[in-house]
Amino acid sequence: MNEYFQLQRDGSIAHLQLCRPERLNTMAPDFFPALRDAVRALHDEGSTRVLVVSSSGKHFSAGMALDVFAGSPQPAAAPATDRRDPNGEAQREAIGALMSMLDTSTPRARLSFQESLRRLIDCFSALDEARFPVICAVQGGCIGGALDLATACDIRVCSADAFFTVQEIHIGMMADLGVLQRLAKIVPPGVARQMAYTGERIDAKRALEVGLVNAVLPDAGALLDHAMALAKQIAAKSPLAVTGSKMALNHARDHGTAAALAQMAVLQSAIFDTAEMAEAIAAWKAKRDGEFASLTPIAKI
């Protein structure tokens, strides 16, 4: 556990819950490597079959905590309707302070900026690259950097009060942690472009219509129950087959059909396991969960 999230295990299902509701679960700089390290530790040890990412409080996350740079007591990236900062003064002050700290005035400074950004991007890529599926359960606002996080997950579900927005366009910058690269492969490209260009909010109903989420639940309690039930359904399957399926889907998303089919031949020949299949078939016929070994831990180098 750290100040940003709690990580719990229930057998082969891990649950990472953002735990700063009083800060609208905003993401301070230390959050990113903490998330990356937690996800990659689960990836390496091999026994996690599904990860559920959720949050506490009214909003999933208001995105990057720009107040860290400005010393503001309010989350600078909070929704505009936040009564604590109705005129957005804290946000404007935080943005000004952030701009003064992100020096891009020289080639050396820009080179450093690029490397810092690559490392931030890598923190959410850990979710995309994990050996297990990641289910993101969103209630309330999923804003700015939080949408980068959500689109790096395999499956998204939300509560009826959820909304999603590419917040960065409102402050004159591109969203830069993965949402522009992933969103158009989840929703129709025109919808992704409209969200990116306007920063408009997509409510839960619209998110379901365009395929951004798989289900809309009445409230946060029902949302978490649904996410956990889905996680249990996945965790009951062969982890070898589930991991292989994720690898194939990710490769197909990022490559053409011919290259993806070539990769499939290599991947299937590498992980095809008749004993695993026999157990899966027996469990399916008996209407029980299969008994499968965990994935082999990744050796430390």
Image (tube, grey):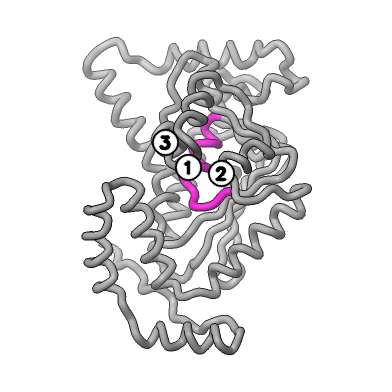
Residue 84, above or below 136: above
Q: Position of residue 52 (x, y in %)?
A: 58, 56
The numbered dot on residue 186 is 1
Residue at the image point whose x is 77% and y is 20% from the top: 83
Which of the labelled discs sits on residue 256, or is there none?
A: none
Q: Residue flagged by tag 1: what amino acid is it?
A: Ile
Q: Which residue carries the number 3 mark?
A: 178
Q: Nearer the viewer, residue 13 or 99?
A: 13
- From the image, state whether disc 3 or disc 1 is nearer to you: 1
The reply to whether residue 90 is visible in this rendering is: yes
Mark found first going from the N terminus, 3 or 1: 3
Could you tell me how far apart the alpha carbons at marks 2 and 1 are, in whole angstroms? 7 Å
Label 2 amino acid? Answer: Gly
Q: Residue at x 59, y 89 (%)?
A: 286
| Mark 1 element type | loop
Compare marks 2 and 1 and give the one earlier in the sequence. Answer: 1
The magenta stretch spans residue 154: yes
Under tag 3, what secondary structure?
Answer: loop
Range covered by the magenta-colored residues: 144-156
Of 298 and 162, nearer the camera is 162
Question: Are there few (<14), some (14-19), or many (20+) residues within 10 Å of tag 1?
Answer: some
Residue 29 percent location from the top left of the image = 48, 33
From the viewer's perspective, is residue 109 above or below residue 57? above
Q: CB of mark 3 within 8 Å of CB of mark 1?
A: no
Asked whether 38 falls inside the magenta stretch, the response is no
> Residue placed at 71% from the left, 45% from the top?
159
Quadrant of the rendering where the C terminus is positioned: bottom left
Does residue 4 appear to the left or right of 224 in the view shown? left
Q: Disc 3 versus disc 1: distance between alpha carbons?
A: 12 Å
- The reply to whether the C-beta atoms of the residues labelled 2 and 1 are less than 8 Å apart is yes
Residue on which disc 2 sits: 211
